[in-house]
Amino acid sequence: MDSAAVLSGVPLAMILKHIKLIVVAAYVLTVAAAAVAIGVTSGAGVIVFTAAALLPSGALLTLWQDPAQTMSETIQASRR
């Protein structure tokens, strides 16, 4: 089955939003697993690992912009 045919009605921005959330969730879970594997139990260690998990992922969500709309997408949107 062709993935382009399945996703033809889904806007690219929506697909990218889901990809961004999956990447962020995977990163946060990886940092959490590393904290558990290392055995972080102190309050300061938990704060450091929380910051290490949330600050880069927040920056990723903020800075990873959706691509500009193409001319074809603009024409299709104006025709609707």
Image: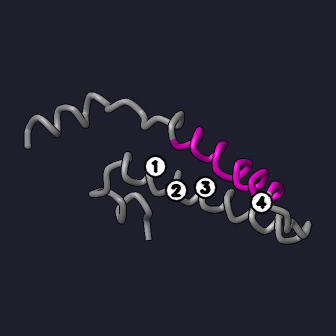
The residue that mark 4 highlights is 46
Labelled pair 2, 4 in contact (Cβ < 8 Å): no
- Amino acid at dot 3: Val
Q: Which residues are magenta?
A: 44-61
Residue 9 picture quarter: bottom left
Between disc 4 and disc 1, whose residue precedes? 1
Q: Is residue 60 rendered magenta in the image?
A: yes
Of badges 2 and 4, nearer the viewer stands 4
- Amino acid at dot 1: Leu
Labelled pair 3, 2 in contact (Cβ < 8 Å): yes
Residue 72 lies left or right of residue 46; in this view the side is left
How far apart are labels 4 and 1 at the CA level?
A: 31 Å
Tag 2, which secondary structure?
Answer: helix
Q: Which mark is residue 16?
A: 1
Residue 56 position, x and y percent, is 66, 43
Between disc 4 and disc 3, whose residue precedes? 3
Q: Which mark is residue 23?
A: 3
Between disc 3 and disc 1, whose residue precedes? 1
Between disc 2 and disc 4, whose residue precedes? 2
Q: Which mark is residue 21?
A: 2
Q: Residues within 10 Å of mark 3 (few under 14, many from 20)?
A: some
How far apart are labels 2 and 1 at the CA level?
A: 9 Å
How far apart are labels 4 and 3 at the CA level?
A: 22 Å
How far apart are labels 3 and 1 at the CA level?
A: 10 Å
Q: State the residue in front, 74 or 55.
A: 55
Q: For the point 36% across and 65% down, which residue is it?
A: 6
How far apart are labels 3 and 2 at the CA level?
A: 5 Å
Q: Is residue 65 rendered magenta in the image?
A: no
Tag 3, which secondary structure?
Answer: helix
